[in-house]
Amino acid sequence: MRIAANDLGRLARLTAGCAGIGAAVLGAVAMPSSAPGVPPAGRLSDPAAALVPAGLALLLQVLPEARRTAGRVVRVLATLLALTSTALGIAELDRYPAAAVAGILTGLALACLDIRVVRSSPDAIRYRVADPLLAGAAVSALLAYGAAPAVSGGLIVLVVGAAMARPFDDSERHLAEELQERQTFADTLLQSMNEAVMVLDANHRVIDVNRRWRELTGHGPDEPIRFDPPPLPPAEGGDWLMPRVDGSAVPVLATMAAIPDAEGAPRAYVATYVDIADRKRAEESLSEQNTRLREANGRLEGALAFKNDLTSMLTHDVAQPISSIASLAELLRADWADLPEDIRLELATKIDKNTQRLIKMMNDLQLLFRLDTGAVTARRAPVPLFEVAEQVVTAAAGDVEMDIDENLAALADRGHLIVVVQNLLTNAFTYGDPPVRLSAAQRGDLIELVVQDSGPGIPSELLAKVFDRFMRGAGLGLFIVRHLVEANGGTVRYERAEPRGARLIVTLEPAPI
């Protein structure tokens, strides 16, 4: 509204200035034609002569730059020209009364163009003194049209121009300066904000954006807005990804507020965006650090649990065979001469059995340490399952039923496969009941190696952790089985046998012999 009013005021002053120039030119042209045969010195008494100073006075009244730079001088000069026009009109009262009256009134109106009269009322309305004078001048100019049409036309042009003239008085000048200062302040404030700001109208069309918004979206300083429609944040605000002209996006904290009109309806919107890319990076870095800390804590907790379990195992299972070996050896040493040969052999066999048990336990622990450090790698090659099974069953501590085709082979590390079968059979002998059955067959694209016993099976509360470390007492067998099978690209699982028993099933990749 303010911009439109300023434009309208400039248009009115431009029209008035043109009217002043036109009246002065018309008066200068009309003087020779209105007084033919009269010497130039005598033409100053012609009614057309009053148009020249009146037009110049009107022109000076509406020149804003001249009024700002030399206001008092211009005002005095315009007043003198207007009074000159009045004097020339008075001189022609006897010859051209109507035109002279119109010239007198126009000159007086131009001389009083800046004067206002305030009417005492609640509204304190201000009236221009020139307005009634201009009305009278217009009527007189129309009456003089028949006698001096050129002069009458020039006077009417002057009257219209003076009526449209809005010269800068002090209050209007101060108001314009104040408005301009406010506009400059608002623009400076908008452009200097660290937050990106976009101002939109009620239809979400962009009115203005600030420098930070252009930087955030990748626009140049004077580049037209390339978003159509503009990117709007969610109504509830908050964290949002603001698109850029290059197709990327920047994380921002966005808000959007409506500017209501007098009825409360939105007349405009202001959207603000705060760049939170640094905050996001800090949050991601902190999240990564927290993740690493959690992983480290998990490893520490696992190491602590492993230490406790290992301590428990060494305290019970390792101490038992060592204690047995020590007591049997002491008995043999103390009573060797008194003991019969068969008793000495029995005691020596028990010492050997406990020693082998202890050696196996130490081998399992060594393998466990290698598995924990990731040092175990599989060198896979075709391995005949019948040969491996026969080798393990021959050295087993119990009877085993075998059902394996001699032409069946798996792609695996032979040493790993031997350990897997040994531990599965040991688990069946230790926790199951006979008969124990070892079988293998090809199922589709995989080979299934199955160890089944006839015992009570694995309790349901242990199923979730049956292949973990130190489960089912202090054993390591199934934990080692799982890791060795996985290192060879296979899997191991448990199934309950019917009508009773446990089935441990290893799946491996088949290979030709």
Image: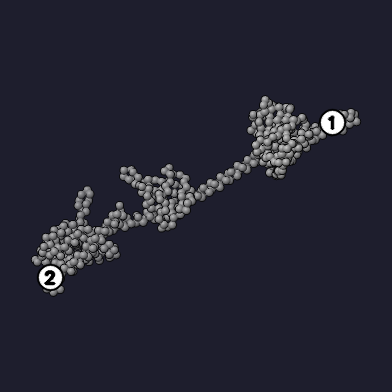
Which residue corresponds to the image point at 15% horizontal and 60% vertical from the top-left? 137
Amino acid residing under circle 2: Ala
Q: Residue furthest right?
A: 337
Residue 108: tell me if it is visible: no
Q: In the rendering, which numbered label is found on residue 436?
A: none
Q: Residue at x 83, y 32 (%)?
A: 349
- Label 2 to label 1, Cα distance in Å? 161 Å
464 sits to left or right of 222: right
Which sits in the foreground, 45 or 82?
Answer: 45
395 or 245, which is in the foreground?
Answer: 395
Outermost residue to the top: 499
Q: Nearer the viewer, residue 168 or 418?
A: 418
Residue 362: quadrant of the picture: top right
Display colour scheme: one colour
Instruction: Write the residue at 19% across / 59% down.
Output: 160
Disc 2 or 1, which lies upstream in sequence? 2
Give the quadrant of residue 48: bottom left
**Residue 133 in the image: x percent, y percent?**
16, 58
Say which quadrant the C terminus sits in.
top right
Q: Amino acid at mark 1?
A: Leu
Label 1, on which residue?
347
Q: Residue 114's x, y, as percent?
A: 22, 59
In the image, taking residue 27 as reference, residue 175 lies left or right, namely: right
Residue 221 appearing in the image = yes
**Does dot 1 land on a helix, a strand or a loop?**
helix
Please state if 207 lies on the left or on the right of 431 as rendered. Answer: left
Task: Reply above or below: 123 against 496.
Answer: below
Q: Residues within 10 Å of mark 2 (few under 14, many from 20)?
A: some
What residue does disc 2 label? 35
Callouts 2 and 1 close, C-beta under 8 Å: no
> Where does the image place residue 158, in percent across and percent down from the top left?
19, 62
Q: Position of residue 454 (x, y in %)?
A: 71, 27
